[in-house]
Amino acid sequence: MLREIRNNYQKHKLEEVHLPDDPIGLFNLWLNEAIQGQVNEPTAMVLATSVHDIPDTRVVLLKEIDNGNFLFYTNYNSAKARQMATNSQVALNFFWSELERQVRVKGAITKVNANLSNEYFNTRPRESQLGAWASAQSETLTGREELEQKYKQLEKQYEGIVIPKPAFWGGYQVTPYEIEFWQGRPGRLHDRIRYYRIAQHDWEFKRLSP
Ligand SMILES: Cc1cc2nc3c(=O)[nH]c(=O)nc-3n(C[C@H](O)[C@H](O)[C@H](O)COP(=O)(O)O)c2cc1C
């Protein structure tokens, strides 16, 4: 029965005396603990968008924290890209179940510069590079065959040569203005610490009721 599934969280806690002034420091610490702790897909984050009051979500992979911004890569013609072009306000959610932790981020999205996207694209495995070219992300297909044919044709086209980054593919960065750290605690008395950006390099935090 679903209603009988519940955990009593007791692995870690969040105490004000140990909190840094800057939430990015704490985020990096938690991310490293998730990576070291063998969490499955530690860099996976849910990206929420919203257009005309209709929300949408999907998982993407965090590829870098650059100057306090959260970076990921995707197709610039995808559904999410079209949504973010209409409304640049997004939210991210990391759930590291093995550590009984989640992090919630709110922020504004911008595209990263093409040099950075090129640099990252060049480090990707060849199959992923071809996959980026082959996929008109979020568009309908006549069947799986169509996608595989396209991939094979691209494989031939680029045989023995460097695959350039498609113009329709690249990075986005989320510049956060709110970051919440949630740590599961016994008896549903969880720790919630939310940081608010009050100036470019200045944050304050408050404890929220779980
Ligand atoms: C673990 C995981 C990681 C993913 N990483 C990415 C990613 O980094 N970039 C991306 O475009 N899609 C990624 N996807 C696929 C997206 O969830 C989504 O299906 C795709 O981006 C299309 O979304 P859209 O139609 O809302 O634009 C990932 C999916 C999973 C489950």
Image (spheres, rainbow, N blue to C red):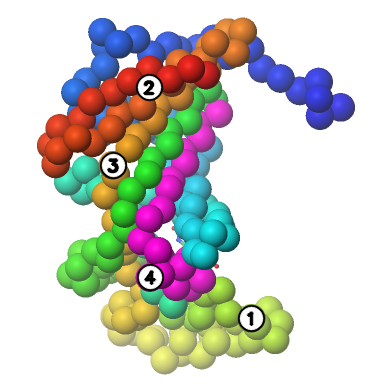
User: In x, y percent, where is residue 64?
Assistant: 28, 49
- Identify which amino acid the numbered label 3 is placed on: Tyr
Label 3 sits on residue = 177
Instruction: Tell which of 127 and 203 is nearer to you.
Output: 203
Residue 85: numbered disc: 4
Q: Name which residue type carries label 1.
A: Thr
* The quarter of the displayed image where residue 29 is located: top left
Tell me whether the residue at label 4 lies in contact with that at label 3, contact meaning CB atoms closer than 8 angstroms: no
User: Does residue 99 appear in the picture of this structure?
Assistant: no
Verify CB contact (< 8 Å) between mark 3 and mark 2.
no
Q: Amino acid at mark 2?
A: Ile
Q: Give the vertical position of 128 relative to 41 (above or below).
A: below
Q: Which residue carries the number 1 mark?
A: 140
Residue at x 44%, y 73% (from the top left corner): 82
Give me the disc on residue 193: 2
Disc 3 from disc 2: Cα separation: 14 Å
Q: Is residue 95 magenta?
A: yes
Residue 207 spot, x, y in % from top left = 38, 17
Mark 2: secondary structure: strand
**Image position of 95 (left or right of 164):** right
Mark number, residue 160 = none
Spatial CA span between label 4 and label 3: 19 Å
Disc nearest the viewer among 2 and 1: 2
Q: Earlier in the sequence, mark 3 or mark 2?
A: 3
- Percent of width and height locating residue 162: 29, 80
Residue at (60, 87) in percent of width and height:
149
Q: CA distance from mark 1 to mark 4?
A: 21 Å
Q: Which segment is the magenta one?
A: 78-97
Secondary structure under the numbered disc 3 in the rendered image: strand
The amino acid on which the numbered mark 4 sits, given as a three-letter code, is: Ala
Q: Secondary structure at mark 4?
A: helix
Please state which of residues 155 and 58 is positioned toward the viewer in this rendering: 58
